[in-house]
Amino acid sequence: MHDPSKPYQELIEENSLLKRRIQDLEHSEGERKRTEQALIKSEAKIRREQKFAQLLLDTSPAFIVAIGFDGKVMMMNQALLKALEYTTEEIRGTDYLTTFVPEEERGMLTGVFREIIREEKKTVNENQIRSKSGRTYLVQWHGQGVMFDEEAPNFFVGVGIDISERKKAEEALRDSEEKYRNLIENANEAIFVALDGKLVFVNPMTVMIMGYSGEELVSKSFTEFIHQDDRDMVIDRHVRRMKGEETPNVYSFRVINGREGNIRWVELNSVLINWLGKPATLNFVSDVTERRQAEEALRESEKRYRELSIVDDLTQLYNSRHFYNQLRMEIDRVDRYGQPLTLLLLDLDDFKVFNDTYGHVEGDQVLSRLGQVVKRCLRQTDSAYRYGGEEFTILLPMTTSADGAVTAERIRMEFKDEIFSQAPGQDVHVTVSIGIGQYKPQEDMKVFVHRVDQLMYQGKKNGKNMVYSESWHQ
């Protein structure tokens, strides 16, 4: 007997399925747009940070230079270019020592740069530089060697200030205070004398930095103007210097401007003198606030570069090169202090089959999602790496194999529940096999990794989608 309502019912069901499909597509499109917007914001933030760092470099009165391991100039900021009377195009690729350093000082500096770069040393030194027209500057450089990794270029970054006038002032004061008083009064850095902890002489630049008149400053203790977090350090160094003990000649700290109330970074160079028959200190203070800001910008730029060089783009986990560097550090710590270290080695099950079936674009989605799951399951002290292809490693410091198994099982279970939908009504799941092992004292690093790798493959042989260790498996 013919049922006239059946075609109508089928239309209703098809219409319902179509509506659900449309809703899924709208949700997917919304997620894509939100992801694109987040990416745009992130890129804009990076551009702003880069622009800010470049602005600090271009506007800083300090001299800033980057020199490669081969001695070639990589970068100079505008202040240094102007002093040397060169353009950016003229200095690019020039040899720093032969072009800008007087011949009599090259021998001293020839081997210094490479040693500093190779050992990533920090350094403070003084040397002369020469402009195109022959003018020389005596510059105090604060620098550090930078070595990212075996593939990235190694170089020296220096931030310098022209101390030619300061040196002249020091020599003048030793010869005759009265003769060179005018020079001190017009110096572009603060100069003051402290006797028994009290200020007995200040120049106009001291007045400007401190924010008080000369009459207000004299007879006050300089420590009154030092930021409370730096006060004890400055007092300790002053007391030790007055006792004749060895202390750094140059160091930085914060002061508070009396009128404006803002915090300024200053650099102090102190020497012992005889003032009216009593021991006192002659102090040269430079406002280095802008230099500190430039240094901070350089540190942030370096940090960003390091992150880009050690992070895998697809999974946002660290890459294998960084894994071995970190593993070496953790093993050294274990050998020194005897704390446990556990390594997890993960491998996606049947990933080649998944790629052949659904394509590499979907395969990349699986890798990315695994990276997200791993991050969610780790502590702040743990670290994860894309070891290669579909293999991942995880370092669990201060963790035994038994405790690490709990983390491994959490990762396995969470990832197993991830859904990779390829068609309506079709849920695709991907699993992972995990090998787990604890470092044995004095074990060779490669042997350790190979041992855990074999445990992971043993898990695959025993059925996949499991955590496998020498003493426990599921």
Image (cartoon, rainbow, N blue to C red):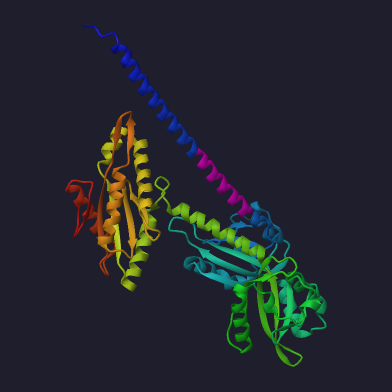
At x 28% / y 39%, what residue is drawn?
Answer: 429
Q: How far across and how far down the image is residue 149, in percent?
A: 44, 58
At x 35% / y 62%, what residue is drawn?
Answer: 327
Quarter of the view holding residue 451: bottom left
Q: Is residue 40 magenta?
A: yes
In the displayed structure, would residue 386 be above or below residue 247?
above
Q: Nearer the viewer, residue 206 or 71?
A: 206
In the displayed structure, would residue 115 be above or below residue 450?
below
Q: Nearer the viewer, residue 457 or 227?
A: 227
Q: Is residue 450 visible?
A: no
Q: How far across and how far down the image is residue 20, in percent?
A: 38, 26
Q: Is residue 260 visible?
A: yes
At x 38% / y 51%, what residue is drawn?
Answer: 376
What residue span does the magenta drawing correspond to?
36-54
Q: Is residue 304 magenta?
A: no
Quarter of the view holding residue 446: bottom left
Q: Residue furthest left?
A: 462
Q: Residue furthest top?
A: 1
Q: Is residue 253 left or right of residue 213?
A: left
Q: How far across and how far down the image is residue 121, in percent?
A: 51, 69
Q: How far across and how far down the image is residue 263, in percent?
A: 67, 66
Quarter of the view holding residue 181: bottom right
Please identify the dominant SS of the magenta region. helix
Q: Is residue 418 left or right of residue 90?
A: left
Quadrant for the N terminus, please. top left
Q: Is residue 86 left or right of residue 323?
A: right
